[in-house]
Each structure stands twice: as structure tokens, then as C-alpha cells.
Amino acid sequence: MSFRDRVTLRDAMRGIVDPSLLPLVPKRFDYVGDIAVISIPEGLEVYRDSIVSKILSMRGNTRAVLNKVSKLEGEHRVARFELLSGKSTETFHRENGYTYRMDVRKVFFNPRLYWERARVASKVIPGESVLIPFAGVGPFVLPSAGKGAAVCAIEINPEAFASLKENVRLNRLEGQVTVIQDDAESILSHPGFLKSEGFQLPENGFDRAIVPTPYDMDRFLGEVSGHVRKGGKIHFYTFKTDSQIPGLVEEYEKMGLKVEYYRRCGNIAPGVSRWVFDLIRNDSPNSKKTK
């Protein structure tokens, strides 16, 4: 989980970094398993070794330190990293009672969303059919399957797909999850492919869809909603400014989606945040709008 201590990394670097450069030091960094992940901005290159030493001293079992040097890139949604300390970037990460094996440099995983993932999992009902495109290494998949849902998970990145299959096995959920490696848009445009993969499509549509949408893919909501039954639930993630939210609520309702709840799930850029919308397909036109 994210590094949360009484002393931030910036505070810990006082007296080491030049005072004029101290505001550049990140206040926080993330742990994925026993690997620390940080983004060291330009201007602090001369202090990299000192920053790494300080991070290693903050938690004794830290096995590697990665510097994130790019945003997510390409269809596989993977950032570029620089290994500053350690030899391997494979790790086991534990979250909400489940274990995830992954290579942090080859897959996308955001440990800061652990509370949000637990929130969504708490809503899953045993026996539901759940569709999860952009499934990654399984942080929405395993908790849903663990609640007794039948999950169809789609992931295009071969590394994440391999990790997802392994994580399903590690957590003994093989009977609950069908994992498909392909492009989610292509798959859902040709639902007959799901049958060919051995997944029993619900007759009236999925009971629930959990959609951790990549940036700039809002168009996908229309596609996925067509595979959810009337009265079914959709948890849809998007990236927007505060000012865009009222218009988005209106747009969703025009699509026949009741906005049951929405909230901000962290900032990703100045003025831009990740938002989650809990939607109900073809429900009443009234909505509860909660920030």
C-alpha cells in the first residue's frame, strides 16, 4: 500500500537536499509488495542515491526501488521504469486478503486504489455474473470471484494476462474465473467469441460490469452497457475535471443509465482526477449524486 508514515519522504530529506530543491522531493511513494516505486523529478538527479538510501531505511524488507520515468504508454498500459536498487522487479503483493504475483515493470498496478477495490467488491453478490474488461493482474477479478461471482476477465497485455491466470490459481479461484487474452473492444463487439472461450454468456446480460477504463476511452461505456442486463450494475472509471462531472451525469442518464453514486478516486494530473460512477442500466431517471 502507499507509504503513509508520520514523516514524509520530503521531511526525511531535510538537511540532505538543498532547501531550494526540497519542494521537488515527492511527499509519498508506493509499495507494490516489497518494491518501492517513486517518481524522481528532474533537478534531483544528484540526490538519487540519497533518496534511495532513505527509502530503503524506511522499511526494512524493501527489496528494490524503481523510478517511474514515463506515464502509461501503448495499448498494454505500461510505464517505463528505471531500477535504482535491487535485481528483480517480480514481487508478491497482498491486498484485501488476496495475493498477486507480478513483475512491476511489465504490468499496470495502482496500489492506491485498494480501498476503492474493496468498496466495489463489497457490492458483489454471490452467484452474479460479472464482466471485467481491462482486468490487469486481477485486483477487481479476485475479490469478485471470492464473493462467489462467475467472472469473465479480459486483458490484452500478455504479461498481465499471465499474471492474472497465475493469481487466479494462487488464490484457488479457477472455478469462478474465465480469463481471455485479447482486446476488450474487439471481444465485446463479437460476443460469440466469449462462447468459443468456454464462457457461458448470461441469457439476459451480465449482472454487473467493473470497468477500470484506460485514459480517453469513455466511448467504451456504450459498448459494455449493451452487455449488462436491465437493472444490472456498472462501475465505470473515467478521467475528468471537476467542471465536466455535471455534464457527464446528464450524458449517462440520457444513455439510459441511472447514476447511483460517484466519487473522486485520486488525482492523475493538475486539475484532472480519476472518477468512479456506479451506474444502473435502464433504471429510474432520478439519481443520487454524491461526491
Image: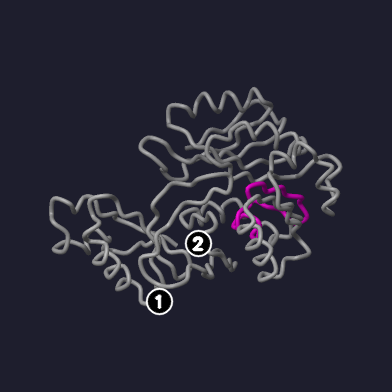
Residue nearest the viewer, comparing 158 with 251? 158
Residue with the mark numbered 1: 61
Which region of the structure is painted magenta?
A: 122-143
Ranked by sequence position, the earlier of labels 1 and 2 is: 1
Q: Which mark is residue 26?
A: none
Instruction: Left or right? Give the position of 227 relative to 10.
Output: right
The answer to whether residue 243 of the structure is visible from this angle is: yes
Circle 1/circle 2 CB separation < 8 Å: no
Q: Secondary structure at mark 1?
A: loop
Residue 229: percent from the left, percent from the top? 77, 38
The kind of residue on which mark 2 rests is Val
Q: Which mark is residue 104?
A: 2
Q: Is residue 135 above or below residue 222?
A: below
Mark 1 Cα shell of 10 Å, populated few (<14), some (14-19), many (≥20): few
Queried whether the magenta region covers residue 197, the answer comes back as: no
Q: Secondary structure at mark 2?
A: loop
Residue 171: percent from the left, percent from the top? 66, 69
Instruction: Left or right? Give the position of 52 relative to 74.
Output: left
Mark 2 Cα shell of 10 Å, populated few (<14), some (14-19), many (≥20): many
Instruction: Left or right? Give the position of 267 relative to 113.
Output: left
Queried whether the magenta region covers residue 136, the answer comes back as: yes
The number of callouts visible is: 2
Q: Nearer the viewer, mark 1 or mark 2?
A: 2
The kind of residue on which mark 1 rests is Asn
The answer to whether residue 138 of the structure is visible from this angle is: no
Residue 2 is drawn in which quadrant? Answer: bottom left
Residue 174: percent from the left, percent from the top? 75, 65
Residue nearest the viewer, comparing 91 with 275? 91
Report how far apart the C-alphas of labels 1 and 2 lie in the structure.
Answer: 17 Å
Residue 286 is drawn in which quadrant? Answer: top right
Residue 173: percent from the left, percent from the top? 72, 66
Which residue is painted at 41% across and 43% down in the image? Answer: 267
